[in-house]
Amino acid sequence: MKQRSGLYNSTKKRALKVLENRNWMDAPTFAYKVGIRPVRRTYAYLDHLEQLGLVTRGRSAAGKLYFQITERGLERLEWLRAQNRTTAQELIAPLLRVS
């Protein structure tokens, strides 16, 4: 997959961070916290994350959709965080070298 100006996976990372506490969340609340606009786009994005096995969906007694992060989603979030640390270390390392 192609990276685009260092922002590749940034939405995924924000999305998984919002769900990190393992609480069930409805799509409009999720959209607000992640910054996805318009809100209707959130359902397609959450469906994509579900296909990747990163979130699971459930319904309330009233039929409202809710989403929760999975174990795989937590593992991916940790991986994404590690990627950012590595990138920062790679950027700083040349500056710290003494000639």
Image (cartoon, rainbow, N blue to C red):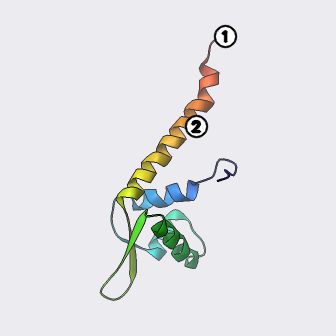
| Percent x, y of residue 6 | 65, 47
Residue 67 at x, y percent in the picture: 40, 71
User: Could you tell which of marks 2 and 1 lies nearer the N-terminus?
Assistant: 2
Residue at the spot 39% in from the left edge and 57% down from the top edge:
72
Residue drawn 33% across the image and 62% down it: 22
Q: Residue at x 40, y 80 (%)?
A: 65
Q: Nearer the viewer, residue 49 or 67?
A: 49
Q: Whole-percent x and y of residue 58?
A: 35, 77
Q: Residue furthest top?
A: 99
Amino acid carrying label 2: it is Thr
On screen, residue 96 versus residue 64, left or right, reads: right
Tag 1's secondary structure?
Answer: loop
Proximity of marks 2 and 1: CB atoms separated by less than 8 Å: no
Q: Label 2: which residue? A: 87
Which mark, by number, is residue 99? Answer: 1
Q: Which picture quadrant has residue 41?
A: bottom right
Crowd around label 1: few <14 · some 14–19 · many ≥20 (10 Å) = few
Distance between mark 2 and mark 1 Cα atoms:
22 Å
